[in-house]
Image (cartoon, rainbow, N blue to C red):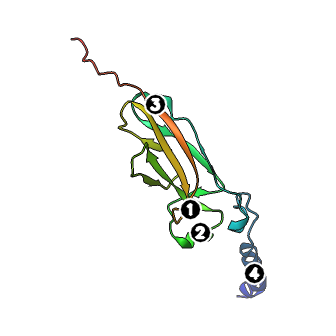
Amino acid sequence: MSFRIKYLPVIAVGALLCAHAWAQSAPDGNRPPTVIPVASEPAPKLIAYAPEPEPLARGVVIIPFRTENLRIIPVFGKGALNVSPRVGHLHVSVDDWPGGWAHTSQDPIIVNALKPGTHQIKLEVADPTHKILTSETVTVTIPEQKSASSPAH
């Protein structure tokens, strides 16, 4: 019994020191940047790259892109206008088709089933309320598809 009483203060002090150490946070090298007010942020920029050539030969358009000063995520509404760093999405349209779609990820844009010929694919950076901030148009030419010939037997 005297053993427990003798070491009880040492155990108590050790527990307090450990609790204090756990409460402190270590510096994090992967910490995100400090939030900057939206009004102070530079304007968003969209960089669209040329479509991948190998899928294009099969009639599939794959357009890699990146944005600067804006994250592409599926967030909509007026409340998201004050998020910093700025967030938004892409509006994608093909040729003069009246429809289009909202692209909400950093994945490449993929369009298939286009007829052979030249097409315009318009990428518009939109804020969470769908206001267009900037845009890029990518011109693609879908080659004539070779008909598949049956192998000789």
Give me the C-alpha separation between circle 4 and circle 1.
50 Å
Residue 106 visible (yes or no): no
Where does label 2 land, which residue? Answer: 81
Question: Residue 6: horizontal and vertical position, in percent?
Answer: 78, 85
Disc assigned to residue 141: 3
Which amino acid is tagged 4? Leu
Considering only order in the chain, which callout, 4 or 3, is on the residue closer to the N terminus? 4
Disc 3 crowd, CA 10 A, few/some/many (<14, 14-19, 20+) = some
Tag shown at residue 16: 4
Q: Are marks 2 and 3 in contact (CB under 8 Å)?
A: no
Give the number of the mark in front: 4 or 1: 1
User: Residue 18 lies in what quarter of the image?
Assistant: bottom right
User: What is the spatial separation of the Cα atoms under label 2 and label 4, in whole angstroms?
Assistant: 45 Å
Kind of element beneath mark 3:
strand
Q: Is residue 151 above or below residue 34?
A: above
The mark that comes first in sequence, 2 or 3, is 2
Residue in the foreground of this view, choosing between 113 and 3? 113
